Image (cartoon, grey):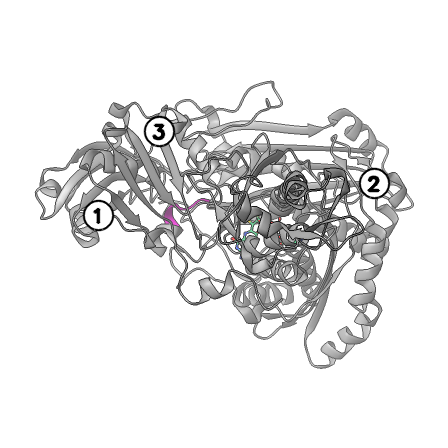
């Protein structure tokens, strides 16, 4: 296959992204955003702004309250360590009485042009009374910290615990050795290519809203809106065609979308908002930002007896809809990694701070776990003087133990962790490293090697099931409908491959419609690397159902008994004869009769892999270069190897971005975001990661009809610890004993200099 089905359309500018939608009598929105981290709103005067040319309407938090629209939703289905449910401080679409982070929406101005709207924003007179702020999660939990929400004492929204605390303590008590590490998983900004945007229309006669927004799934967005606006589901359509990247930060409802919907209602005109890159930095959900402490208990032979983790998560000023889930169960779904460990416990305290809300970002919690766990295991190998691969090998869950129940109740379906590790050692020339290190040393460079054996959960999902529809057109084409969105993953191609293999029709005759409001379906948004194994599986079931449906019609057409009809290569034929009719011909002859709508709940499965990285550091400049990268992954059965390799490469690069430079920095005293543009915020470029060696080690799962595991996030879950382990290993050669991300030249140089003094 040459390229992906969607490539020509997207590469020739024929995609339809959110800001490509235009409407008759369309007006434009701009936002007044808080320029301070924490303050009471004393007064807002709108007269001067209203009098500006072209201004049509201005909405504020009072209008949202008057409309009866509630807080943006958030949820966590469990109670915390003391039996308490999640504290859910209110998060109105526009600030009501107080602002809690720089960039929070205060007012939405609608005008005849984007410039007129922006000018009027600047004419709004607002008086604030500043309050003390806190941007660090541990500081926010300390006694005497500024309190963000009246309903959240001590800024602690949830005190999560998972695993068996007593059994873990008992195992630690009898350990021959205990290894400890503390690491920061730094805050990053997602930065999809397409900045956030939306357009809203309101049909007063039908009391009906339509929202056009860049989203990873229209059904999830609609249900979040229904929850916040308290209106029936059929009064809202959410529409999205092409979406320019998501990475998790396009999953949830955002305040701007509700504000623009209200503005459209008030102005009586369609309203469009196209955010800027600055607004992405200030007000998109941000990610990671965990302080992590880990302890590993080992017996005298280096067997893992128990693990214990204590985490503090910074959730930002408000709880994003999925923020609490991602920071708790999203992290601990693979608490003990690929290791066979009898006891484990994790405690995570979720704190509010005066920063942008935090939620899912590629890996959605799993890279937090893989990072602390694999840094811990690497440190154990270092302290024991053991080969890091050998220590891992000794502790992996053996093939014979699947399905494997983890110490906190997770169930890994299948895998071959030892086989994956051995493949990676071979592919990375593990044994040749000593010679490469000596060669680098001779050139005055520090060469380090890092390994990670990771695992992640894919397949969950919040919706009750995944539903797809398949319609056969008069032109012989097949249209597939799903609610999960493709925003870079190539679903148009892979779903078509699955369906084409069953129906025997050409790939090019298959189209994909994501979230078409005319075909309302229940289903999950794209997230958790589950689209192929969830939606793709249901696509296959739907295709098989269509083939079955066609049998009776073929029998009628061929004047034979249905039992005598067989289907092969796109045609029904009477067994043992050459009398046949194609499925396409039947679809044309019997319009609508082959159409199907199918659903299924698909369970979780656990992709895993072993990544090995080598990083060379130039001690005089602090510059770090990835010299080799090897990834062996078990994604189960693979539908499209090119796409899978692209996904791995993208994920690995995303991990490399965080390890080598990405960092969102808030000034501690003022809460100002110091890294609010690409001038200050590092973005990984293509040259950061050399062409990786990518290998598959598939162990097909029985949990879905395709035998597939997810792949979209695996690259980052594996690369974050592998790369940082390599950096730390290189720096050890320079005498550095402790180092935190990001490994920018300045920070690396400073660490080496400090170690030399
Ligand atoms: N695939 C395959 N065989 C497998 C597994 C997957 O051929 N065994 C293919 C799938 O058919 C699909 C692609 O690989 O075309 C990714 O599939 P999957 O692992 O199911 O992940 P999703 O499609 O659900 O994508 C979500 C995942 C997530 S959660 C984030 S975050 C992410 C990611 O994918 N964001 C991305 N990859 C991204 N890639 C791009 N370009 N942009 C983003 O925003």
**Of the numbered discs in the image, which one, if any, rests on residue 102?**
none
Frontmost residue, 300 versus 408 = 408
| Residue at 57% in and 58% down | 654
Foreground tag (3 vs 2): 3
Q: Position of residue 209 (x, y in %)?
A: 31, 34
Answer few, some or many: residues within 10 Å of disc 2's Cα (few below 14, many 20 plus, some between 14 and 19): many
Name the residue carrying label 3.
235
Residue 20 in sight here? yes
| Residue at 25% in and 48% down | 23
**Of the numbered discs in the image, which one, if any, rests on residue 340?**
2
Q: Position of residue 224 (x, y in %)?
A: 44, 32
Frontmost residue, 697 versus 587 = 587
Frontmost residue, 646 versus 320 = 646
Name the residue carrying label 1.
24
Q: Which residues are magenta?
A: 281-285
Q: Quadrant of the N terminus?
A: bottom right
In space, the residues marked 2 and 1 are separated at their CA atoms by: 62 Å
In space, the residues marked 3 and 1 are separated at their CA atoms by: 21 Å
Residue 284 in magenta? yes
Of helix, strand and loop, which one carries label 3?
helix
Foreground tag (2 vs 1): 1
Farthest-out residue, top: 83
Q: Is mark 1 within 8 Å of ligand 1?
A: no
């Amino acid at each position: 296959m040459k390229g992906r089905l969607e490539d020509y359309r997207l590469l020739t500018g024929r995609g339809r992204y959110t800001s490509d939608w235009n409407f008759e009598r369309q007006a434009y929105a701009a936002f007044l955003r808080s320029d301070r981290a924490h303050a009471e709103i004393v007064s807002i005067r709108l007269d001067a702004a209203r009098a500006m040319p072209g201004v049509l309407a201005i909405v504020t938090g009072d209008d949202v309250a008057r409309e009866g629209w509630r807080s943006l939703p958030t949820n966590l289905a469990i109670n915390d360590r003391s039996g308490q449910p999640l504290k859910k401080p209110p998060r109105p679409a526009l600030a009501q009485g107080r602002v809690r982070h720089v960039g929070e929406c205060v007012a939405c101005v609608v005008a005849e042009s984007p410039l007129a709207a922006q000018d009027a924003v600047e004419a709004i007179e607002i008086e604030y009374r500043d309050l003390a702020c806190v941007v660090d999660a541990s500081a926010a939990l300390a006694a005497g910290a500024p309190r963000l929400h009246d309903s959240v004492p001590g800024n602690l929204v949830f005190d999560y615990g998972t695993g068996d605390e007593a059994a873990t303590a008992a195992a630690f008590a009898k350990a021959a050795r205990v290894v400890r590490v503390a690491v920061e998983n730094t805050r990053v900004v997602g930065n999809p290519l397409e900045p956030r945007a939306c357009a809203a229309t309101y049909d007063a006669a039908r009391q009906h809203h339509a929202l056009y927004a860049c989203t990873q799934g229209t059904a999830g967005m609609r249900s979040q809106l229904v929850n916040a606006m308290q209106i029936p589901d059929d009064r809202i359509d959410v529409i999205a065609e092409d979406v320019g990247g998501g990475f998790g930060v396009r999953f949830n409802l955002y305040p701007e979308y509700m504000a623009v919907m209200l503005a459209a209602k008030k102005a009586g005109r369609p309203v469009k908002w196209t955010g800027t890159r600055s607004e992405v930095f200030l007000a998109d959900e941000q990610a990671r930002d965990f302080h992590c402490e880990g302890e590993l208990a080992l017996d005298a032979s280096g067997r893992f007896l128990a693990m214990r983790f204590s985490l503090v998560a910074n959730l930002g000023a408000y709880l994003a809809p999925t923020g609490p889930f991602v920071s708790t169960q999203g992290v601990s779904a693979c608490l003990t990694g690929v290791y066979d460990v009898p006891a484990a416990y994790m405690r995570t305290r979720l704190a509010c701070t005066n920063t942008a809300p935090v939620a899912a970002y590629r890996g959605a919690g799993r890279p937090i776990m893989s990072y602390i766990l694999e840094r811990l295991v690497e440190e154990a190998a270092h302290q024991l003087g053991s080969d890091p691969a050998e220590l891992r090998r000794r502790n992996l869950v053996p093939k014979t133990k699947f399905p494997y129940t983890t110490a906190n109740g997770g169930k890994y379906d299948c895998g071959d962790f030892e086989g994956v590790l051995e493949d990676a050692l071979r592919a990375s020339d593990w044994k040749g490293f000593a010679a490469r290190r000596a060669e680098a040393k001779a050139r005055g460079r520090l060469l380090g090697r890092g390994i990670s054996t990771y695992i992640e959960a894919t397949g969950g999902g919040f919706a009750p099931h995944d539903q797809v529809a398949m319609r056969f057109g008069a032109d012989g084409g097949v249209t597939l409908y799903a609610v999960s969105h493709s925003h870079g993953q190539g679903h148009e191609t892979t779903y078509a491959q699955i369906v084409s293999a069953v129906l025997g029709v050409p790939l090019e005759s298959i189209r994909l419609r994501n979230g078409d409001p005319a075909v309302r379906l229940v289903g999950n948004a794209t997230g958790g690397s589950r689209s192929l194994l969830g939606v793709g599986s249901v696509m296959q079931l739907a295709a098989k159902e269509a083939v079955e449906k066609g049998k009776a019609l073929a029998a009628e057409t061929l004047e034979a008994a249905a039992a005598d009809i067989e289907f092969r290569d796109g045609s029904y034929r009477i067994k043992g004869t050459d009398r046949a009719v194609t499925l396409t011909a039947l679809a044309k002859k019997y319009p609508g009769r082959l159409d199907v709508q199918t659903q299924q709940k698909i369970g979780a499965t656990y992709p895993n892999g072993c990544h090995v990285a080598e990083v060379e550091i130039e001690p005089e400049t602090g510059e770090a270069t990835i010299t080799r990268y090897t990834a062996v992954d078990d994604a189960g059965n693979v539908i499209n190897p090119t796409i899978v390799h692209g996904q791995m490469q993208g994920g690995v690069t995303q991990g490399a971005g965080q390890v080598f430079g990405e960092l969102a920095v808030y000034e501690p005293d003022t809460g100002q975001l110091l890294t609010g543009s690409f001038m200050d915020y590092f973005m990984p470029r293509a040259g950061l990661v050399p062409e990786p060696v990518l290998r598959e080690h598939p162990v097909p799962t029985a949990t879905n009809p395709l035998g597939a595991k997810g792949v979209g996030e695996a690259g980052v879950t594996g690369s974050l610890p592998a790369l940082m382990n390599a950096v730390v290993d290189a720096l050890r050669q320079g005498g550095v004993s402790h180092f935190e991300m990001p490994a920018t030249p300045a920070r690396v140089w400073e660490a080496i200099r400090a170690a030399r003094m």
